[in-house]
Amino acid sequence: MGGVRADAVVCRHRRAKHPPLECSDPSDPVCGNRSTNQHTGNSLVRESVLAVSHLSVCLSSGDTVGFAVPRRSGGYVAGVGRSIVAVDWLTQTMTSLAEVDEDKPNNRLNDGKVDPFGRLLTGTMAKEVRPAEVQRQQGSLFSVTSDLTVTKVLNQVDISNGLDWSLDQRTFFYIDSLSLTVDAFDYDSNTGHIDNRRVVYRMEEEEGLPDGMTVDAEGRLWVACYNGGRVISIDPVTGVRLQTISLPVTKTTSCCFGGPDYSDLYVTSASLGLDQSERRHQPLAGATFRVTGLGVKGRPSNSFSG
């Protein structure tokens, strides 16, 4: 597609993992749905990428941050270490809400997302020896309800990663990175129960590991390919790859639609694990990119009801 363009909008040498998140209030005159929230190792970073300026606020967490999602009651909820915490940007504070994998101190939370009903789903993994190298089958996937009840819905996970839902909310899409597949489950929106696991897409060798994921307004999947330097679009019904967006970095980590009408795709990347030669050849490694001209739109993010 000739009009597609990828521009670095936040250039920092960091281990940026999770996607830019839309502001919880689209009418916010400062954010205007262009604010992004990321984690960079042990910090949460709030970026406001405007046409004429760039504002960054950093909040140190003291442990690895796996995800950040908006909260209906205000602020954000994040995964820090094995704890799910409430984040207040105004006061620069974090308050613990729940903890997972208490019997596995070497685990940490990774990706997380909220379903259309306000339920949080988030998964864990063993802490990495090196990037993408972990003790296998130590992680799990959890469902967290508004009363902060935590339920394990899947175990023996390697690296719990991208997740999202179909437009009719009956299908849950999920990535366990080391399986090299994008999977689907039947989803019970009343209980958060998942069942009937099947493979939607199997990664090609050159595509690397499936990492973060989002679903657009037409129901197609967009998957960031770690060590693949690209984002791929997939038809979840046919399992066919529809489009490949190449980036000037190899460690693309996640993606999310944003902008005033959700027509921009924001893609995060990592620099951790690159040697000096690779860093010289990838000066934008760790940057966040804005991809325009795709001709598709995303959906607003859901806010946690707890």
Image (spheres, helix red, strand yellow):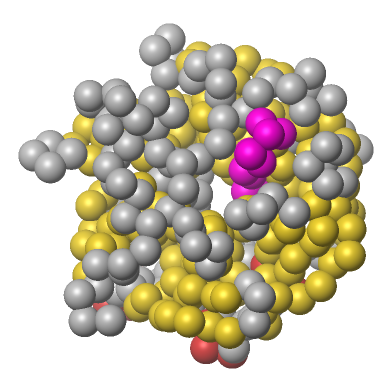
Q: 291 or 165, which lies in front? A: 165
Magenta-highlighted residues: 109-119
* Residue located 38% across and 57% down the image: 297
Residue at the front extreme?
Answer: 168
Count the marks: 0
Name the side, left or right, on which 222 lies relative to 167: left
Identify whether 111 is placed above or below 35: below
Residue 113 relative to residue 259: left or right: right
Q: Does 251 lie within the magenta span?
A: no
Give the residue displayed 55% in from the left and 62% down from the top: 219
Quadrant holding the C terminus: top right
Residue 206 drawn above or below residue 16? below
Residue 273 appears in the picture as rendered: no
**Of residues 10 and 20, which is closer to you in this image?**
20
Q: Residue at point 69% right, 50% down?
A: 169
Residue at 62%, 15% in the rendered image: 95
Q: Position of residue 110 (x, y in %)?
A: 65, 48
